[in-house]
Each structure stands twice: as C-alpha cells, then as structure tokens.
Amino acid sequence: MAFFFGPIAGASVSIVSLRRMRHPEKAKRVFLWTLLAATLLAVVLLVTSDGLGRVIGLASEAIFYFVFPRIQNHEFEEWEEAHPDLPPSNGWKALGWGVLGLVLFLVIAIVLALLIPSAA
C-alpha cells in the first residue's frame, strides 16, 4: 500500500492493524512519526528539482514499502499465535485506507506548497 499510495497510506493500514491487535500506543506513535516523515518528505519534494525529486520520491516509496510491514510484524506474529483459527483481515479493505492516506498526503503537500514561497 505504501509503495503505490504514499507513506500515510502505508501508515493508515498499519495503524488500523495495530489497533485491531490491541496495540493503540504503538499505533499512535506510528501515526505521529509518519505524519512528521510525510511532512518532511513533502517539503523536500517541493524544494528540490523535478529530476532529483522523482528519484527521492521513488526511493522513499520503496523505503516505506519495506518499513511498514516490519513495524507491525512482531505484533502480528503474536496475534497469529493467539488466534490460530482466525484468518487475517481482508486485504481489500486496506485499499480504502490507502486511498484516504493518498488524499491526506496530497492535502499536506498542497498546504505546504502554499506556505513555502519558493515552492509555489
């Protein structure tokens, strides 16, 4: 999800999963750190040249693709051991969270573009 829809999308899916697995504190930390990282990423993308911005954007998407599954891996393994008879949640539901995350990231980028004079 993070690779195609951005960091907030990946975080949204992780946050929902962590909350379902009864780890609300970690879900809150993931949200706050992702919000900070997404804001910094948006600033970097807004102030860099198009060519370099594309490389940075693609590299960050790849990094987020590997980071978010690892964030919840330990908790998911614990949940799986405690609930061997229950299948994990349907992955299609995550698509909605991914779209919401993409929209939120675009809102952050647009607000920052309006606030940063050189990016406008």
Image: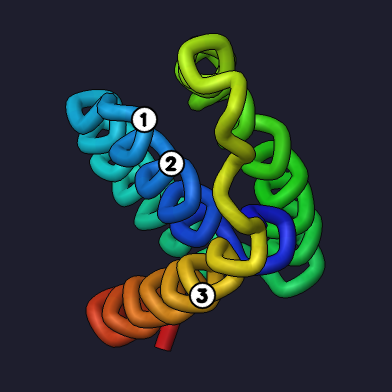
Q: Secondary structure at mark 2?
A: helix
Q: CA distance from mark 2 to mark 3?
A: 14 Å
Left or right: where 58 falls relative to 34: right
Q: Which residue is mark 1?
A: 21
Location of residue 20 by image quarter: top left
Q: Position of residue 114 (x, y in %)?
A: 29, 86
Given the image, on which type of amino acid does mark 1 rest? Met
Quadrant housing the N terminus: bottom right
Quadrant housing the C terminus: bottom left
Task: Say the numbered circle drawn on residue 96.
Answer: 3
Residue 102 vertical placement versus 21 (above, below): below
Q: State yes or no: discs 1 and 2 in contact (Cβ < 8 Å).
A: yes
Location of residue 115 by image quarter: bottom left
Which residue is more in the foreground, 53 or 95? Answer: 95
Residue 99 vertical placement versus 74 (above, below): below
Q: Secondary structure at mark 1?
A: loop
Residue at position x 19%, y 26% from top? 25
Q: Position of residue 2 (x, y in %)?
A: 63, 54
Q: Secondary structure at mark 3?
A: helix
Q: Which residue is mark 2?
A: 17
Left or right: where 61 falls relative to 85: right
Q: CA distance from mark 1 to mark 2?
A: 6 Å
Q: Residues within 10 Å of mark 3 (few under 14, many from 20)?
A: some
Location of residue 3 by image quarter: bottom right
